[in-house]
Image (tube, grey):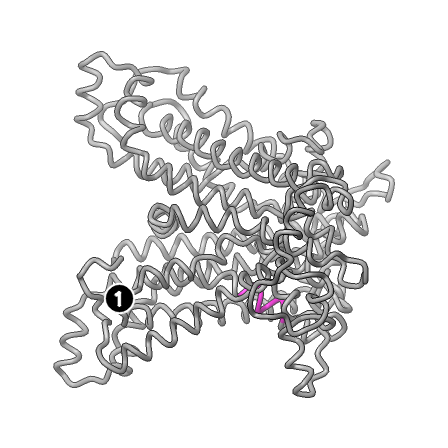
Amino acid sequence: MRRTVFPHKLLPWLLLAPQLAITLIFFYWPAAQAFRQSVLREDPFGLSSQFVGLANFRKVLNDPAYLNALQVTVVFSVLVAFFALGIALFLAVQAEKIIRGKGLYRTMMIWPYAVAPAIAGMLWLFMFNPSFGTLAWPLRQLGINWNPLLDGEQAMALVVAAATWKQISYNFLFFVAGLQAIPKSLLEAAAIDGASRRHAFWTIVFPLLAPTTFFLLVVNTVYALFDTFGIIHAVTGGGPGRSTETLVYKVYNDGFVNLIMGDSAAQSVILMVIVIALTAFQFRFIEKRVHYG
Amino acid sequence: MDNGTHSPLAARGAARTIAHLWMILGVIIVAFPVYYVFIASTHSVQTILRPPLPLLPGAEGYENYRAAFSGEIDRIGGVSLWRLLGNTTLIAVGIAVGKIVISMASAYAIVFFKFPFRMACFWLIFITLMLPVEVRIQPTYKVMVDLGLIDTYAGLILPLIASATATLLFRQFFMTIPDELLEAARVDGAGPWRFFKDILWPLSLTNVAAIFVIQFIYGWTQYLWPLLVTNSNEMNTIVIALKKMVSFADADTPWNLVMVTSVLAILPPILVVVLMQRWFVKGLVETEK
């Protein structure tokens, strides 16, 4: 709290009014509605509804389609986070070894950040489209029966590639910042002790990067869970045969295409719990980082 | 970036050359999809449909772009390319400016005034971080219908301008302003507006630029929200329109025009990020920590 403040009483409320109004109307009210609907069951015409307790949750959690979406989401998120973090870290380390031309590389690396997820998905589908994708063509020449529009695993590979590609930029920038914060003296000491560069990387650099890596792990998980909706929607539509249907895609599909309100609301509430857990985890960890950092 | 102080990881000799080679490979992978769609946009449909695609631009570029801008997109998608670009720019700028205005106002209120429930207001804004659109799709859509915001610019922009991250950043920054500055201003008889306009705003410019870039990209790349709240083609963003144009099963898809539209959908945000790189990188790495 500051020592000096302006004495006005009404003005701060006026300044806060637009933001508060928007959060109340478009965030809190709908979120409250999602909770309310999640314990009600409505008839398809929305004419009447009755309280059903946790029945919607029970139904959702016993639904094989939901469990499938949960599994798809876990596989998808783990793969995207692993590859996006791994590739970005590798490239950030290479970039730090370089003296001239770093700026140019960075300029090229940040492009995908600016590409909408849905378009990132489409770009990859253009390249790997079974009928005219230039990169699908060599796969066929190698005798691979490449058709991501029919084969679930290939569809998953394609959306993972597009989602990973888009996230590399972000992770790269953070890893570069993290690497630059490592004290030079530590590495010099290791070099004097005769440690190989590889050894020094795993024993000094990697542990010191842990805060950045944990932070990025949370961000990448949230990204894979929510921001990749566009990729799935534009590339596979959850298919073929639900093989790329993630939790967020299913909420959208049940609520807007299949119009099952109670289930959709219960799914929303489950997602909300996941986000709250992830955000809480992130901030707990950031507090820790302040102590050590 | 290259300011003479070498990174603690800087390598020499062969190791450095190998690092360059890896970076070149990385850049090729990262830039290739964008390059590929650009190349495709300069070829005819026949060439695009007959893989492999040439690695160099074709001769149809001018014709493709001219056709796209002079009514061909209108014929396929029911809305002109100009209108799509206009809509998307308006939404992206609207969201970025809107977020900056209301977040600065909130942070100013929270930091420079004392009033009941001050921190409660802060937490109320902060918690919206945990309520992304994706977890409240259905009821938020209903609010939009009830308020008559479907197919309006207000509907596309307003619900997205609440910003916990921007408010957080401005609050943090305002807290670093020394008390002496405010005291001096008050001795000179400056009110809240004068203090903001003459002292705080000029000091905030770097932060404003950083947030502008990040939020412009956020606005430009929106997908789920415009998908929900627009029915009319006239209100589409370029991203949504592109998705509607692309049908991989349909043999009649005018791929050359799809490629042109893709290029135009990714070029403006890439330019913004590349040209405002300095503020963007600083803003990204500092805000999110």
Mark 1: secondary structure: loop
| Residue appearing at x 86%, y 36% in the figure | A47
Tell me the quadrant of the picture where the N terminus of chain A can be found. top left
Of all chains, the one bearing label 1 is: A
| Residue appearing at x 33%, y 71% in the figure | A93
Q: Does residue B277 lie above or below A189 as drawn?
A: above
Residue nearest the viewer, comparing A110 with B32: B32
Looking at the image, residue A256 sits to the left or right of residue A92; the answer is: right
Residue nearest the viewer, comparing A111 with A29: A111
**Residue B168 x %, y %:** 39, 40
Q: Amino acid at mark 1?
A: Arg
The residue that disc 1 covers is: A100
Magenta-tinted stretch: A158-164
* Outermost residue toward the front in this view: B59
**Residue B70 x %, y %:** 69, 41
Residue nearest the viewer, comparing A100 with B64: B64
Circle 1: is it few (<14), some (14-19), or many (20+) Cα within 10 Å? some
Looking at the image, residue B95 sits to the left or right of residue B70; the answer is: left
**Residue B82 x %, y %:** 64, 38
* Prevailing SS of the magenta stretch: helix
Q: Does residue B209 lie above or below B262 as drawn?
A: above
Res. B153 in view: yes
